[in-house]
Image: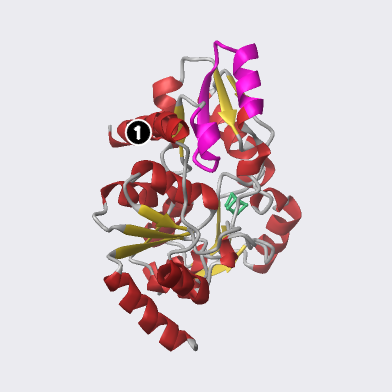
């Protein structure tokens, strides 16, 4: 089937199945364009918790679909690309965190939403790159452990002067950014603003004109006066940036900013998931209950 036919079929099946399609900003442009909601992890979590659709087709990676299932256990959650994982989430296991907690019972665990449900279940609260300020503010006087991203963790620890240990995980896409990339782009585009996701190394973050999660990067580009932005995050975000700020110019900081797992979803896999009800996400009951507490607290603190 060509793309036009696939889009027609997806729309038809979606109506038939009373489904909603959620897509992360890092998804391929054609997938973002057929989604009902495109957003960051936090926005998609909130949508998943509020939708009255019977089926959620989650165009993203495994931990995101798991979060949707935890927030909407009565709904069918489908992940079109069955093997779309997140290498960052896999840098910590349930057993490793359990051992750490036994050895460090005084530390509260703050868990980046980019983690498995079983790691969330052992955590006190979840956090995303768009709401960490509010969540951290609540815990700033406690001894903490942040899992699993060492870059975002180090950035937050320094910004708030926290007593916080940081798990040595990282996103293999953002962590590869270097000062060499920054120097090359600054030379090529001296008038452009450099905006960077906090999953990048601190050395790169320190060169940025603005640091923020995906929604923050879009909002900054829309609201600030620069005409051109060098963007230090996964290149899928540029599709939404160009839509929301069509009069501005965007250039990705490095052509390597492409997440292989995020690009496993395409129109064909979305169509097949809806047609065959395949790749349904299941989360064990006890894990679901404990993980939900950490996600619910994040949402509560984000609303305050
Ligand atoms: S961009 Fe990084 S953190 Fe996001 S899904 Fe890909 S590997 Fe995981």
Instruction: Report whether 36 appears left or right of 64.
Output: left
Image quadrant in which the C terminus is located: top left
Residue 33 in percent (x, y) is at 41, 73
Residue 93 in percent (x, y) is at 64, 33
Residue 248 in percent (x, y) is at 45, 71
Residue 212 visible in this rendered orientation of the protein: no
Q: Residue at x 33, y 46 (%)?
A: 72
Q: Is residue 82 above or below residue 286?
A: below
Q: Nearer the viewer, residue 117 or 302?
A: 117
User: Looking at the image, what colour scheme do you see?
Assistant: secondary structure
Q: Is mark 1 within 8 Å of ligand 1?
A: no
**Magenta-colored span:** 95-121
Instruction: Report whether 279 appears left or right of 255.
Output: left
Q: Is residue 121 above or below residue 60?
A: above
Q: Secondary structure at mark 1?
A: helix
The residue at which mark 1 appears reads as 296
């Amino acid at each position: 089937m060509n793309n036009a036919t696939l889009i027609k079929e997806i729309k038809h099946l979606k109506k038939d199945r009373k489904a909603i399609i959620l897509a992360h900003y890092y998804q391929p442009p054609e997938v973002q364009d057929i989604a009902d909601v495109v957003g960051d992890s936090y926005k998609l979590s909130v949508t998943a918790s509020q939708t009255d659709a019977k089926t959620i087709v989650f165009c993203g990676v495994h931990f995101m679909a798991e979060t949707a299932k935890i927030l909407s256990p009565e709904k069918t959650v489908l992940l079109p690309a069955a093997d779309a994982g997140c290498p960052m989430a896999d840098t910590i296991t349930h057993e490793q965190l359990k051992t750490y907690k036994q050895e460090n019972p005084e530390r509260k665990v703050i868990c980046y939403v980019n983690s498995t449900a079983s790691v969330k279940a052992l955590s006190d609260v979840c956090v995303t790159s768009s709401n960490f300020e509010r969540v951290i503010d609540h815990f700033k006087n406690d001894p903490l452990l942040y899992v699993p991203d060492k870059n975002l963790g180090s950035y937050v620890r320094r910004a708030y002067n926290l007593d916080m240990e940081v798990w040595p995980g990282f996103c293999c896409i953002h962590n590869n950014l270097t000062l060499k990339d920054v120097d090359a782009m600054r030379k090529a585009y001296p008038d452009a603003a450099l905006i960077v996701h906090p999953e990048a190394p601190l050395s790169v973050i320190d060169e940025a004109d603005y640091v923020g999660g995906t929604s923050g990067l879009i909002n900054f580009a829309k609201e600030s006066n620069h005409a051109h932005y060098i963007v230090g995050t996964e290149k899928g975000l540029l599709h939404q940036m160009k839509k929301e700020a069509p009069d501005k110019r965007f250039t990705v900081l490095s052509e390597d900013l492409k997440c292989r797992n995020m690009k496993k979803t395409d129109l064909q896999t979305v169509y097949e998931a809806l047609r065959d009800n395949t790749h349904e996400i299941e989360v064990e009951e006890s894990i679901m209950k404990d993980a939900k507490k950490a996600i619910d607290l994040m949402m509560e603190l984000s609303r305050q």
